[in-house]
Amino acid sequence: MAHSTTHTPLDRLLAIAIVLLIAVALAMIAATLPELPAAIATHFGLDGRANGWMTRDGYARVIVVFTVGFPIAIWAMVALAPRRFPRFAKIPNRDVWLSPAHRAHTLERLDTFGRLHALGAIVLPIGLHWLVIAKNVPTTGSGALVGAIALLAIAVAAQVVTTIALKRAFRRPP
């Protein structure tokens, strides 16, 4: 069954922002990959010491796929999955919001929330890449590590805030 979707100006703006941020992230990755050594430390123990490595080419493939794929997967889980599999929609009062009376509006709102989640999700691979740079390129200094940790914290905070907003948006209607 096909569903028509009306995209709001916010949805269009979010889509443009997602594409632009992914493009900027990919450009940053491409610009910084040559700085990395042939064998890259990509996994670290609790003490901060490396305990897992990848080749630069292997890492490049993984980080590019993660940078593009992770936000798309997040959006698809939030926005597309409920269209095909409503029972998997993780929203409060799901039976009410996905009833015929509310379904079209709910799916539009989930699309917007999916885009918001995707936008926040792009920050995670950027932060992880920055962390890899900080741990593998000696000339970056401790500021790069602090920046990487800040980006990772922003990624987590963005997901928490968006999830709270989604939960609040789907309270039981009056």
Image (tube, helix red, strand yellow):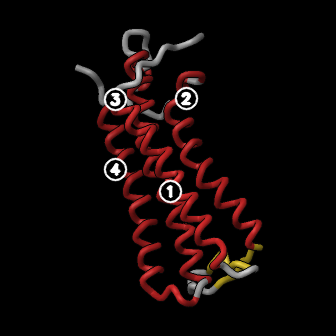
Q: Residue furthest left?
A: 174
**Measured Cα–Cα span from mark 2 to mark 1:** 25 Å
- Secondary structure at badge 2 equals helix
Q: Residue at x 37, y 37 (%)?
A: 13
Whether residue 43 is situated above or below residue 116 in the rendered picture: below
CA separation in Å, label 3 and label 2: 19 Å
Q: Identify the residue position indicated by label 2 in the image.
A: 80
Point out the frontmost of discs 2 and 1: 1
Tell me the crowding category of disc 1: few under 14, some 14 to 19, or many 20 or more residues within 10 angstroms, Cα based: few
| Lower position in the chain sequence, tag 4 or tag 1 | 1
Question: Where 150 sits versus 99, above or below?
Answer: below
Q: Residues within 10 Å of mark 4 (few under 14, many from 20)?
A: some
Check contact, mark 3 vs mark 1: CB within 8 A: no
Q: Which is more toward the observer, 15 or 84?
A: 15
Q: Nearer the viewer, residue 150 or 45?
A: 150
Of the two numbered discs 3 and 2 on the same chain, state the one appearing first in sequence: 3
Task: Label 4, secondary structure: give it.
Answer: helix
> Where's residue 94, x and y in %?
43, 25
Q: Is residue 60 left or right of residue 149?
A: right
Q: Which residue is mark 4?
A: 161
Please tell me the numbered disc located at residue 24. 1
Q: Nearer the viewer, mark 3 or mark 1?
A: 1
Q: Are marks 2 and 1 in contact (CB under 8 Å)?
A: no
**Where is mark 3, residue-wise?**
9
The mark that comes first in sequence, 2 or 1, is: 1
Amino acid marked by disc 1: Val
Left or right of 171 on screen, residue 108 = right
Nearer-N-terminus badge (2/4): 2
